[in-house]
Amino acid sequence: EVVHLYLQFLHDLFKSEESKSFLALAYITGILPIKKIENESALNNFAEYTMLDSKNLAQYFGFTEAEVRELCERFEMDFESVKTWYNGYMINGLHMYNPNSVYSAMFNQSLDSYWRNTSSFTMINRFITLNFSGLKDDVLNMLAGGRADVNVIHFKNDFLGINSKDDALTALIHLGYLGYDAERKEAYMPNYEVATAFQSALQTGQWKEIAEAISNCDKLLWATIDKDSDKVAEMIEVAHESYTSVFKYNDENSLSCVLTMAYFTAPAYYTVIRELPSGKGFVDFAFLPRRESGNRPAILVELKVDKTAETAIRQILERRYMGALQQYKGEIIIVGLSYDRESKHHTCEIRSIKNM
């Protein structure tokens, strides 16, 4: 009732005959578009510019890539690192960055998840805890680099009226916690900062087993750097078991998704590239250390199903996948991972070479 009264007030203020005598232009900002009531709005004389379609105002919805590149030069920050953390929104063909996060990173000279300290973060918990059919699978698929089909048409622009998976995903798009591909009508995880916000939210309710698996990601990364092949194989196997309900297919693509989740925290230190062209083929995963990553080595990972981990190592060497890292000088860890579909057992081989 209060919402209806408020909309009637706005209608009288902005759409009545009397308002024409004193009102030339009204400009309203907020998170959501104007609330829909029975598929209509009391303020349908407004032109709306949203995260779904911002038309010619897109360049003002955040920092553009050119602006961020200029800021990185000015404040001596690594652009590729900032891009990994805060890029990912494509609005009307423009790359868009969260202004608050970019500003905070420049001011503090530190890359971090600044947005999850805001009040809107609680919305993630609320929506994913509803756990509409298919929502959990879609969120995990997006965290692993995939996309989710979403119908944004029926959302009533009201956080209290979340009645379906599509409503929840659309609300998260408006909040900026998901990117939206308007052409393909797909939602996706825009950047690493947002992914870490979801990581924190997953620690609630029915998602705890996923959160526990993600919490081991740093340990897995250090086990890889320490060349502890048995530990790596063991932890990948646990991760695969944790995500089996989502990544149902039993092939290299499934293992790639599992690996993305298993090394969830790697983008904080590495530029992670799947299917990197190199030598005589494509290396499945390349972890390229960024400037602020300390002395961490580069990592190349090759995946095999129903073949040995040694076969994966041999493929990296014979096809000279290290050629993709010609500009990198230092230690390169090459990792062969194998998954046996019958026994569901994982094996791992790790070697180290120097790129001089």
Image (tube, rainbow, N blue to C red):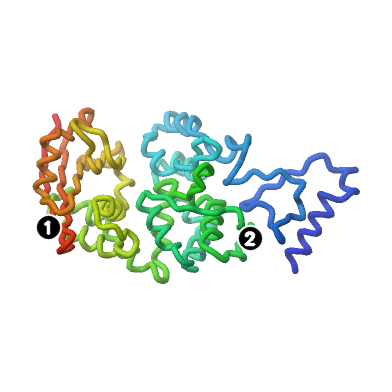
Residue at 38 percent of width and 58 percent of height: 140
Helix or strand or loop: what does disc 2 sit on? Answer: loop
Give the x, y percent position of residue 106.
45, 39
* Marked residue nearer the N-terminal end (1 or 2): 2
Residue at 15 percent of width and 47 percent of height: 336
User: At label 2, which amino acid type do we have?
Assistant: Asp
Residue at 57 percent of width and 66 percent of height: 163
Helix or strand or loop: what does disc 1 sit on? Answer: helix
| Residue contact at pointers 1 and 2, CB within 8 angstroms | no
- Name the residue that disc number 2 marks: 158
Disc marking residue 331: none
Q: Which quarter of the rendering shows the C terminus?
A: top left
Image height check: is 102 above or below 341? above
Give the x, y percent position of residue 148.
45, 53
Asked if residue 119 lies left or right of residue 13, the reply is left
Residue 210 visible somewhere in the drawing: yes
Direction bottom: furthest residue? 205
Is the residue marked by circle 2 packed among few (<14), some (14-19), or many (20+) residues within 10 Å? Answer: some
Give the x, y percent position of residue 329.
19, 31
Asked if residue 294 lies left or right of residue 93, the reply is left
Residue at 53 percent of width and 51 percent of height: 173
Is the residue marked by circle 1 packed among few (<14), some (14-19), or many (20+) residues within 10 Å? Answer: some
Image height check: is 146 above or below 216? above
Residue 329 visible somewhere in the drawing: no
User: At label 1, which amino acid type do we have?
Assistant: Asp
Question: Which quadrant would residue 53 be assigned to in this image?
Answer: top right
Q: CA distance from mark 1 to mark 2?
A: 50 Å
Give the x, y percent position of residue 236.
21, 58
Disc marking residue 230: 1
Along the line of sight, which residue is nearer the eye, 343 or 45?
343
